[in-house]
Image: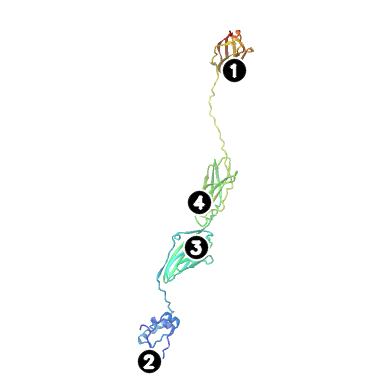
């Protein structure tokens, strides 16, 4: 039988009692005559179905099978899947999603599925903390929202979209970072010349991410200003060079990650004093040269003619060491101390001035130089003429 049987003419006046609702839901299995024509809506609205009698073929099911199905729970009808579930993960979320502490996390993940699938989120395999994380599921997307992210919010977030017996999953890695802590200590190891050696220990807290390096700064005690020496330096020791002689320096080290430099930095307890090295000059021995020499005239006296009443001068040049004594002679007679003559000697240049010469002042004049090594002399003739 396929469908509800019509009542015979003889039995239209009285309808047999309707089978119970539980039996109506089991008609396709137990062979009730009116189940194939009845709809779920009819069962839910309590519409009555009229049935005459069950045919012998309808009662051929074993009694044990009937009792088994009657005692089982009521089966549920699964919806028909028109579009399989699928998650469209944005490209930016396919790698680790990095946020700073205090930032807002707002992720919109689109998906597909028809009828509307069921979307659920988990954090590291556990249910979300609804006090910190909010989720809104729409027809075609799901939104994960964290107002102020903390480092505890880092981890693996998994979105699962289920429809019937089908499901699709996507995993998002979220990393919440902050500034690192300062290096634990810094020590001035050695100072030599204009250089200083520093050592420090890494920070205990790296800010939930890897360090990009260290920033080393120096400050001299005169100005107190800090200047950067090294940036993003990866080792735990360094040598600071080109320090100014005579200054004293302090040093500090910052740790650095993607969020920036650490808020504080340890400072060296000891100052690096850059002292001027004592320079010792060693002179090479040498034999002192002897510049001593006997007198020698380099420029002799020249003969001259003068007019009565007009002064005349005689010049010559002598070289000697030690300094020689200069003696002037006239006709081989010493004229030193005579007021008529004025003798001068400076830097080897010897001069004799004859003041207002007369006719008897003419003759042979001699300049003689004498020192411990010897003597030398030069002569010249002086003529005095009377004007006509």
Q: Is residue 332 above or below residue 138?
A: above
- Above/below status of 84 relative to 323: below
- For label 2, count other residues whose C-alpha is less than 10 Å away and answer few (under 14), some (14-19) or many (20+): few
Q: Earlier in the sequence, mark 4 or mark 2?
A: 2
Q: Nearer the viewer, residue 339 or 159?
A: 339
Viewer-nearest of discs 4 and 2:
2
Q: Residues within 10 Å of mark 1 (few under 14, many from 20)?
A: some
Where is residue 142 drawn, in percent x and y? 47, 66
Of pointers 2 and 3, the one earlier in the residue sequence:
2
- Using a 10 Å C-alpha cutoff, classify the residue at mark 4 as few (fewer than 14 neighbours), some (14 to 19) or many (20 or more): some
Residue bearing the label numbered 1: 345
Decide if residue 363 is in sight here.
no
- Say whether marks 4 and 2 touch (CB < 8 Å): no
State the mark number for residue 10. Answer: 2
Residue 136 seen in render? yes
**Mark 1 or mark 4: whose residue is earlier in sequence:** 4
Q: Residue 359's quadrant in the figure?
A: top right
| Above or below, 210 relative to 79 | above
Q: Which residue is mark 4?
A: 213
- Mark pair 3, 1: CA separation: 107 Å
Say if mark 1 contacts mark 2, CB within 8 Å. no
The residues bearing labels 4 and 2 have C-alpha atoms spaced at a distance of 100 Å
* Quarter of the figure with the N terminus: bottom left
Mark 1 → mark 2, Cα distance in angstroms = 179 Å
């Amino acid at each position: 039988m396929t469908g509800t049987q019509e009542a015979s003419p003889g039995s239209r006046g009285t309808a047999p009692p309707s089978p119970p609702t539980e039996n109506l839901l089991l008609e396709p299995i137990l062979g009730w005559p009116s189940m194939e024509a009845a709809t779920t809506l009819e069962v839910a609205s309590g519409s009555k179905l009229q049935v005459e009698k069950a045919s012998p073929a309808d009662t051929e099911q074993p009694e044990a099978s009937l009792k088994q199905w009657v005692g089982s729970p009521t089966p549920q009808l699964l919806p028909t899947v028109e579009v399989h579930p699928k998650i469209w993960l944005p490209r930016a979320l396919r790698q680790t999603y990095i946020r700073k502490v205090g930032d807002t996390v707002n992720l919109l993940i689109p998906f597909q599925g028809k009828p509307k699938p069921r979307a659920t989120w988990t954090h590291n395999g556990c249910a979300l903390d609804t006090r910190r994380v909010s989720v809104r599921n729409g027809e075609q997307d799901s939104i994960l929202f964290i107002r102020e992210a903390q480092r505890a919010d880092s981890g693996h977030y998994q979105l699962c979209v289920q429809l019937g017996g089908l499901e699709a999953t996507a995993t998002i890695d979220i990393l919440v970072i902050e500034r690192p802590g300062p290096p634990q200590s810094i020590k001035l190891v050695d100072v030599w010349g204009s250089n200083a050696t520093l050592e420090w220990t890494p920070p205990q807290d790296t800010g939930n991410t890897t360090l990009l390096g260290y920033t080393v700064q120096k400050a001299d005690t005169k100005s107190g200003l800090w200047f950067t020496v090294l940036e993003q330096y990866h080792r735990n020791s360094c040598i600071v060079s080109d320090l100014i002689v005579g200054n004293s320096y302090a040093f500090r080290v910052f740790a650095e990650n993607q969020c920036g430099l650490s808020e504080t930095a340890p400072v060296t307890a000891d100052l690096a004093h850059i002292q001027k090295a004592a320079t010792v000059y060693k002179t090479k021995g040498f034999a002192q040269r002897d510049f001593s020499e006997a007198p020698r005239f380099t420029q002799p006296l020249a003969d001259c003619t003068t007019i009565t009443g007009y002064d005349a001068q005689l010049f010559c040049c002598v070289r000697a060491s030690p300094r020689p004594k200069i003696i002037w002679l006239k006709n081989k007679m010493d004229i030193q101390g005579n007021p008529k003559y004025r003798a001068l000697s400076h830097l080897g240049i010897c001069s004799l001035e004859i003041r207002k010469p007369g006719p008897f002042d003419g003759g042979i004049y001699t300049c003689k130089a004498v020192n411990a090594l010897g003597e030398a002399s030069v002569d010249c003739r002086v003529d005095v003429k009377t004007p006509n």
